[in-house]
Amino acid sequence: MQREAIGVLLALGLSITAAPAGAGNYGGDTLVRVQGTVVVPDSSAKVNIDPAADADVSTEVIPTLTLTHFFTKNVAAELFCCFARFEAEGRGSLNGVDLGSFWAFPPIVTLQYHFDPVGGFKPYVGAGVQYIHYFDGGKSDLGGAKIKLDDSWGFALQAGVDVELGQGWYFNADIKKVWLDTDVSWKDTAKADVTVDPLIVSVGLGYRFNMSDIFGTRSAAVPLK
């Protein structure tokens, strides 16, 4: 399932960014990015079976996509999306215990301010929310019980820069920090309150254009002001 999800994500990104080079427009209303992303959870847990029991969530490298819509030349909204598979491992009195693997669908929506470009560099900042849906939890060493995580919400901050490469293309670097918690259970074996708080670092390529140039419209696009 991991390979299929990554394949679908990459195929979608390639199909979107395969637009004609002549359609690129640094004043366009739409920006799509395909990125490589490192997700670094700053995790800790309170496991009810032992006060000294803790847990750690693995760091993962995954492909990601972003879709940004510009309301003005400076104000935009971004959707960040991906699928990721993580491993949970015990720490403290549970050190080395396999707590199970799980999949996550963790979209982030941010409202952004993009500064005017200087020498082709266009920095931006943003703030928003992340929602994580956890699914397909695997078996653990806790009596063979499967790990189950409750869906969670968190607050996100973001900063990044787009560097002009020509014809609407950008090189992008982006960093996000999210603060969120979730409840975890292993059937009747154990429960835990887990702090996730991931740091999300991405680099990739972006393509900016007017949506009407790709899909057509009955009227001319209005330049962003």
Image: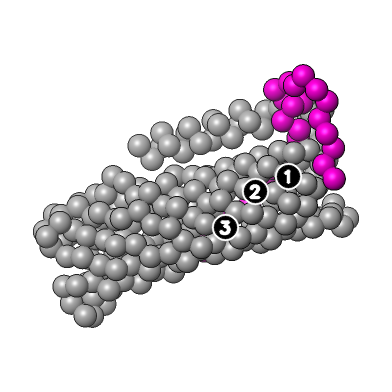
Q: CA distance from mark 2 to mark 1?
A: 8 Å
Q: Is residue 198 visible?
A: no
Q: Would you call the spot at circle 1 few (<14 residues within 10 Å), some (14-19), or many (20 or more)?
A: few
Q: Which residue is mark 3?
A: 128
Q: Please indicate, yes or no, whether residue 129 appears anywhere in the rendered image.
A: yes
Q: Are marks 3 and 2 in contact (CB under 8 Å)?
A: no
Q: Is residue 66 left or right of residue 193?
A: right
Q: Please provide percent x and percent y for residue 38.
A: 52, 56
Which disc is residue 77 wearing?
Answer: 2
What separation in Å lies between label 3 and label 1 (alpha carbons)? Answer: 16 Å
Tell me where residue 28 appears, x and y as whole percent: 78, 38
Q: Which mark is residue 60?
A: none
Amino acid tagged 3: Gly
Image location of residue 209, percent across then percent down: 76, 35
Q: Earlier in the sequence, mark 2 or mark 1?
A: 1
The residue beneath circle 1 is: 71
Left or right of residue 218, residue 41 in this image: left
Q: Is residue 119 above or below residue 179?
A: above
In the image, is residue 62 part of the stretch drawn in magenta? no
Q: Is residue 2 above or below residue 43?
A: above
Where does the magenta region start and end? 199-225
Q: Could you tell which of marks 3 and 2 lies nearer the N-terminus? A: 2
Contact? badges 2 and 1 (CB < 8 Å):
yes
Identify the residue at the far right of this view: 119
